Image (cartoon, rainbow, N blue to C red):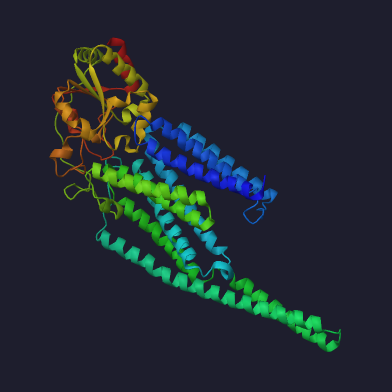
Amino acid sequence: MELQSFVAIPNVAYLGAAILFILSLGGLSNQETARRGNSYGLVGMVIAIGATILLLVVPDAYGTTRVISSDNWTLLIATALVGGVIGSVMAKRVAMTAMPQLVALLHSFVGLAAVLVGISTWLTADLAGYGSDLVHLLEIWFGVAIGAITFTGSIVAWAKLRGWLFGKRVPGAPLLLPGRHALNAIAALACIGMAVPYVSDTVSQAETAVELEKQLQAAEGVLERIENESAGTRLMQDEINAAVAEVERIEAALQVASHPSTDSRAFLFLMMLTGLTCLLGVHLVIAIGGADMPVVVSLLNSYSGWAAAAAGFMLANDLLLVTGALVGSSGAILSYIMCKAMNRSIWNVVFGGFGTDGGNPTGEGAEIEGEVTVTDIEEVAELARNAKSIMIVPGYGMAVARAQHLVNEFSGMLRKRGCNVRYAIHPVAGRMPGHMNVLLAEANVPYDEVFELEEINNDFANCDVAYVIGANDVTNPVAKTDPQSPIYGMPVLDVEKSKSVLFVKRSLSPGYAGIDNDLFYRDNTLMLFADAKKMTEDIIKNL
């Protein structure tokens, strides 16, 4: 195979991987194609990794082979194996309810990688070669900034989702500092301002390196001329020694000037940027309440994509650049869509605001008084047998119990009895985009039975039974009635309008918004406190 043809293989592979990533993102948006979308993403990543390895062993377009020592190959393989083992263990052990936390944590790794790549790229730059390239310097600056925000912001999101901040009662409560918007603006302006001395100092050093390189070329020319003219006399030998000394002096100075130093002012500003943007990432996310964390996770996904794109620029890696830009842009669009679905302002979320103007930022809505009505399997089975229409509302209770297959079996039995069965999905169901789509697709739930909030909400009034499986905040009526609630203004499923509401839940514990669900205390609500899988299995047996 000719060199040019062989060199083209990794680039073609990158293009194929990028197309598969696009198909994966598109597939996850629909229940019918969700499972296929996951497969596209997996195959695309395998191809991308293979192409990257191939680039390390084949010549480039100029016929130059990248030389990697055996020690580096050992380190590369060992790192990949360790990362693969850790990822596999985490994926197998993580509970479905902890999936958003895991996603947020993985985003932090991407952000940290972008920071380290940016700093190492600057420290190893050949200033005499391209150090004065303004675009290259700014992409390093941007990569470090967005990476640091993603890193610390994702860690805070992970901690909030785990309930490690501000107590267990309101695990996702926001921390709203006085003048937070002014603080964000000052931090952003400081980041922009520090870019000026960082660029100017680096360019100044690069110009010095370029000038020294010219001096070196001139000194080497003088040395060559003297050596050619030398007749071996003592006088000429002294001139040669002097010329050699000058060449060595310039080489030593060029060696210092060609590479950035940790003692330079530019490096100081780069480190100040890293620290400031790390604090900014904490401040931006810590001001967001638990009810809005789905949007935050999606937004951090967008940030991680832009951080990966910046790393692609710095490493001259087309795959990182293309896929990072895809993830960044799609994440931004998805965040906007989710904000619209939750009646939130995207700008409030981006700049550390909270929800809507009417919501209580403390997460402490009005206290709900009342008693719940607890039912049993026999009553539920009787209710299901007599129902003409049933609306299934899946939530994280179904996900953690992995009850989607039994729920599909349950709906199939009802369908055979002539019951009209449909699934109602909130736009941010499961607190992770595409999550419910994937689960329902895995259970082979017919895609034409799955409807989102806007399509199905008006039909609850004509529904005999709403079967809610662990969907908490997205079914809470206080979002429509209590201006003091942190979820006020967020569209919710109107399950309370059904003739009967069957709510399967492990306990009366609140969701991530940290508030009680008024639906639990309604006269038409029957509570079943148990594991969703076991409860659905028992209902099927008694149906």
Whether residue 521 can be seen here? no
349 vs 314, left or right, is left
516 vs 171, left or right, is left
Query: Considering only vertical position in the picture, is 198 above or below 243?
Result: above
Residue at 54% x, 73% y: name it: 206
In depth, the one of 130 and 373 nearer the eye is 130
Q: Percent from the top left, x then y, of residue 333?
A: 32, 47
470 vs 28, left or right, is left
Q: Residue 178 occupies which quadrant of the picture? A: bottom left
Q: Percent from the top left, x then y, of residue 200?
A: 46, 73
115 vs 218, left or right, is left
Quadrant showing the C terminus: top left
Query: Considering only vertical position in the picture, is 367 above or below 299?
Result: above
In depth, the one of 84 and 236 nearer the eye is 236
Residue furthest to the right in view is: 232
Whether residue 365 can be seen here? yes
Query: Considering only vertical position in the picture, is 398 above or below 163?
Result: above
Q: Percent from the top left, x then y, of residue 470?
A: 28, 29
Residue furthest to the bottom in view is: 235
The tally of labels here is: 0
Query: Considering only vertical position in the picture, is 457 above or below 351?
Result: above
Residue at 52% x, 45% y: name it: 14
Quadrant showing the N terminus: top right
